[in-house]
Amino acid sequence: MTNKLVFFGGGNMAEAIFSKLKNNPAFKIEIIQNNNERAQELSHNYPEFQIWQTLDSTLDKNDILIIAVKPQHAKEAINAIKEKIKDCIIISVMAGIPSQTIINWTGNERVIRTMPNTPASLGLGATAIYCPELVTDQEKAIIYSIFEAIGIIYPAKDESFVDKVLPVTSSTVAFIYYFIEGFINHAVEKYGFTATDARNLVNQTVMGSSAMITSNPNIAIEELRARVTSKKGTTEQGILTFETNGLHDIIAQAMDNCYNRALEMAKEFN
Ligand SMILES: NC(=O)C1=CN([C@@H]2O[C@H](COP(=O)(O)OP(=O)(O)OC[C@H]3O[C@@H](n4cnc5c(N)ncnc54)[C@H](OP(=O)(O)O)[C@@H]3O)[C@@H](O)[C@H]2O)C=CC1
Ligand SMILES: O=C(O)[C@@H]1CCC=N1
């Protein structure tokens, strides 16, 4: 069976998902993108999808709407289409907006909260999904299949975990880039590597380190680290610098501020 999958907002996160679904026969994809320039770019890059600037038709019970607009635009954007999305399945990828708020805006109770991340475009995504009880097992299987097609899923036991994964998976993509930028910039500025060489070397190291974790599920990450850290060697001095300056405390603070912002957004954009 083919399901109609309509993306409301065709920006970065939506594209990370639909780019990976484009050859998937299970879904007939349509994109609502109000910005004309972006709509044209999407039409050019994805001739297999239908691109609209507004939602003209009413969605049916089995159709799926993925809401992928920014949280601050959501209320107004959804209000403009609410009469057409009363019966469909609604999946939100928006940070911070609780499902009850979306129910209040739409009058539709079949609202699923998810939190994906951009590596979805490579099939390497990680998506937390919270389905309320009124979603049937059959519907749940379809919803899970969308996100399984773009990576791993984490079925959240309650909705709070959709916000709690923000500093674990979704925002973390940017946190990791920020960390990587630090290594690259200093390699260029202090040690004279070209920007390209530094990028390639650091990136290969990040990929290799990550692959070591994946290939050694029974070895603690601390142990993998210990195998690099020779007593009185070079790595030890670097780790000591991180420890002395409380890097793990800084990471914890960044995670808490990220999560707290989601809670704040729930109040700000209701
Ligand atoms: N980026 C990420 O890594 C992640 C994002 N998210 C969530 O995904 C959502 C989208 O984020 P992101 O993709 O980064 O943001 P973008 O700004 O890239 O995407 C939003 C898109 O929606 C369009 N849009 C706005 N209003 C309407 C409307 N009324 N009708 C149709 N299209 C509209 C915007 O057009 P225009 O440019 O003209 O405003 C834009 O193209 C957010 O809610 C965010 O919380 C979740 C996980 C990760
Ligand atoms: O920064 C944001 O709000 C979005 C949600 C997770 C990643 N980007």
Image: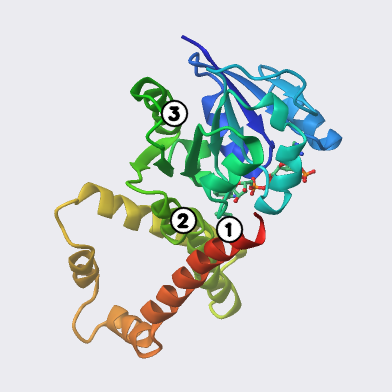
User: Which circle's residue, 3 or 2, is located before the other in the chain?
Assistant: 3
Q: Which residue, given by chain and number where applicable, does mark 1 sit on?
A: 266
Spot occupied by residue 163 in the image (x, y as percentages of width and height): 46, 56
The answer to whether marks 2 and 1 mark residues whose Cβ atoms lie closer than 8 Å is yes
**Element on which disc 3 rests:** helix
- Mark 1 Cα shell of 10 Å, populated few (<14), some (14-19), many (≥20): some
Which residue is more in the foreground, 221 or 111?
111
User: Which circle's residue, 3 or 1, is located before the other in the chain?
Assistant: 3
Q: Going 61% across and 21% down the picture, which residue do you hit? A: 29
Q: Is residue 157 visible?
A: yes
Q: CA distance from mark 3 to mark 2?
A: 19 Å
Q: Which disc is residue 163 wearing?
A: 2
Which residue is more in the foreground, 245 or 251?
251
**Element on which disc 1 rests:** helix
Q: Which residue, given by chain and number where applicable, does mark 3 sit on?
A: 143
Q: Going 36% across and 90% down the picture, which residue do you hit? A: 244
Spot occupied by residue 251 in the image (x, y as percentages of width and height): 43, 74
Q: In the rendered image of this protein, does residue 268 appear above or below residue 229?
A: above
Residue at the bottom extreme of this rendering: 244
